[in-house]
């Protein structure tokens, strides 16, 4: 069944609301040079049509509220509705108001920063970055400022990343002006220590790591890696995408990391996906604290305030102070669970992943790096099956597929992360569906899905020739 665009439902002269006469005209408020020459081509529909259109759209969408969403590396965990109520309490807050009138909001940010510092082992933190990749860029710019301040900015021009790293890691380093060099994984899926030793030196600014890594494995030699970096004057950067596996159990700061970014929209149940908003706080050790973005939330004798007096700061990285309502949700999550609750959530995330991995192995799937999995794992289908076909087949069976073809070091990769919030029955049903796919005829898999709102799309064409606007030829 086709689903018309809102523009296709438009009929000239129809209205869903009528503005009261008291609303001033645009020309009375905005200078003429900033006004449109013609009205925008907005759809004209009545209220009932509008409500039915967007309600219908919502029923066609897939998310954690509607189905199991095992996207490895993305941590699509459930977002408690209590957090939405907490965020709504601040709906009338305005970013331009006097900080003295927003003490509750500033206190919440300060407390959240203290919680995150305690969980990561960092000495100082900024809540400003808008998302994980933005936090990465902020962290690398802090490292760059540190080296420049020490007179090593021109010599330390290389950032090292593992071959299993998130794609944003090398992209971030490149954006910050660095050369990127890849460190291979060893046979067990962890960083090849000998290869790392060959690359370290006075030309290296930082090593970016995720721990657990994107294969779902904990880097057991992290303390050795940290020692080697320290001896070479290299800053160790922690990509916090996988903190969900270790929160409350292990701290990046204790492992020797100098910088950490966190994904509140992954680890701390802030809604994730759909383009945002996310939140990517960055914590640092004391020697990097002077370079944090301005302003920082500080507590003084007269209350909480925004500190702009930071001469070595890299400057602002976000308008105002980040995505504040995302911070409220993360604060509510931490306060609701407490340390023991966070530890239990991490333990359940690991338990669910290990259980599901064993179920899939029983169904015939392979796990090329089959060490002790943390919160996620990377599987392969049997020889002759394509990950893409299995992903499309899962849609037909009512499940959102896992991440496919990542990390790149695993052929036909299926990256699965069940999160801590899924029930045992859900994991078993997903495993049954994965097993059922291996029994389907090849032709069925190659043409799935069949009953979804749209059939199999041409992803290559969609990337090369995207249609980003709707043009009404009438």
Image (cartoon, rainbow, N blue to C red):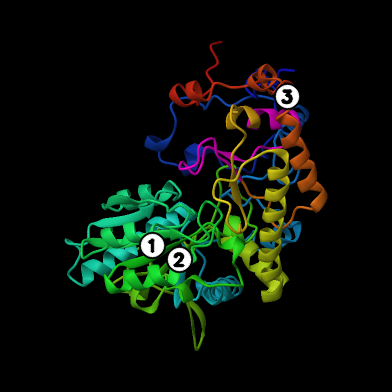
The percent position of residue 408, horizontal first and vertical second, equals 46, 41
Q: Residues within 10 Å of mark 3 (few under 14, many from 20)?
A: few
- The residue located at (49%, 63%) in the rendering is 219
Residue 430 in magenta? no
Circles 2 and 3: CB atoms closer than 8 Å: no
- Image height of 272 relative to 58, above or below: below
Q: Quick one: 352 or 110, which is closer to the camera?
A: 352
Which disc, if any, is residue 178? none
The percent position of residue 173, horizontal first and vertical second, equals 33, 53
Circles 1 and 2: CB atoms closer than 8 Å: yes
Q: Is residue 58 toward the left or the right of residue 71 in the image?
A: right
Residue for badge 2: 260
- The residue located at (72%, 43%) in the rendering is 362
Residue for badge 1: 139
- Image height of 445 relative to 277, above or below: above
* Region in magenta: 391-415
Residue for badge 3: 440
Q: In this rendering, does residue 93 appear at all?
A: no
Q: Residue furthest right?
A: 425
Name the N-terminal-most of marks 3 and 1: 1
């Amino acid at each position: 069944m086709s689903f018309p665009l809102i523009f296709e439902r438009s009929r000239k002269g129809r209205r869903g609301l009528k503005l009261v006469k008291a609303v001033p005209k645009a020309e009375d408020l905005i200078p003429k040079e900033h006004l449109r020459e013609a009205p925008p081509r907005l759809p004209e529909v009545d209220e009932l049509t509008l409500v039915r259109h967007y309600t219908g759209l919502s029923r066609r969408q897939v998310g954690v509220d509607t189905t199991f969403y095992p996207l490895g590396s993305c941590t699509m965990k459930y977002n408690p509705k209590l957090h939405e109520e907490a965020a709504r309490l601040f709906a009338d807050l305005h970013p331009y108001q006097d900080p003295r009138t927003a003490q509750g909001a500033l206190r919440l940010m300060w407390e959240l920063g203290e919680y995150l510092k305690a969980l990561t082992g960092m000495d100082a933190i900024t809540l400003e970055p808008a998302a994980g990749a933005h936090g990465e860029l902020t962290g690398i710019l802090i490292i760059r400022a540190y080296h420049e301040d020490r007179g090593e900015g021109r010599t330390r021009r290389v950032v090292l990343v593992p071959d299993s790293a998130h794609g944003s890691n090398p992209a971030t380093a490149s954006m910050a002006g660095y050369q990127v060099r890849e460190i291979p994984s060893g046979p067990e899926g962890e960083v090849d220590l000998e290869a790392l030793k060959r690359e370290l030196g006075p030309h290296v600014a930082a090593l970016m790591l995720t721990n657990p890594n994107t294969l779902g494995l904990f880097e057991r030699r992290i303390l050795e890696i940290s020692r080697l970096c320290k001896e070479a004057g290299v800053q160790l950067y922690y990509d916090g995408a996988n903190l969900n596996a270790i929160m409350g159990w292990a701290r990046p700061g204790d492992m020797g990391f100098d910088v950490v970014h966190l994904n509140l929209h992954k680890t701390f149940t802030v809604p994730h996906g759909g383009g945002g908003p996310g939140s990517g706080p960055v914590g640092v050790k004391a020697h990097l604290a002077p370079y944090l973005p301005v302003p920082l939330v500080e507590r003084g004798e007269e209350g909480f305030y925004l500190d702009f007096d930071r001469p070595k700061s890299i400057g602002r990285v976000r308008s105002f102070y980040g995505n504040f309502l995302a911070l409220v949700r993360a604060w509510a999550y931490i306060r609701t669970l407490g340390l023991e609750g966070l530890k239990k959530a991490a333990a359940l995330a690991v338990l669910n992943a290990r259980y599901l991995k064993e179920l899939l192995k029983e169904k015939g799937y392979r796990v090329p790096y089959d060490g002790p999995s943390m919160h996620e794992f990377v599987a392969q289908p049997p020889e002759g099956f394509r990950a893409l076909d299995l992903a499309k087949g899962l849609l037909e069976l009512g499940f959102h597929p896992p991440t496919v073809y990542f990390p790149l070091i695993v052929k036909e990769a299926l990256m699965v992360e069940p999160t801590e919030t899924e029930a045992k029955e859900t994991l078993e049903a997903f495993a049954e569906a994965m097993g059922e796919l291996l029994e389907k005829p090849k032709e069925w898999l190659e043409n799935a899905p069949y009953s979804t709102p749209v059939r199999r799309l041409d992803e290559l064409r969609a990337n090369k020739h995207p249609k980003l606007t709707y043009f009404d030829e009438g």
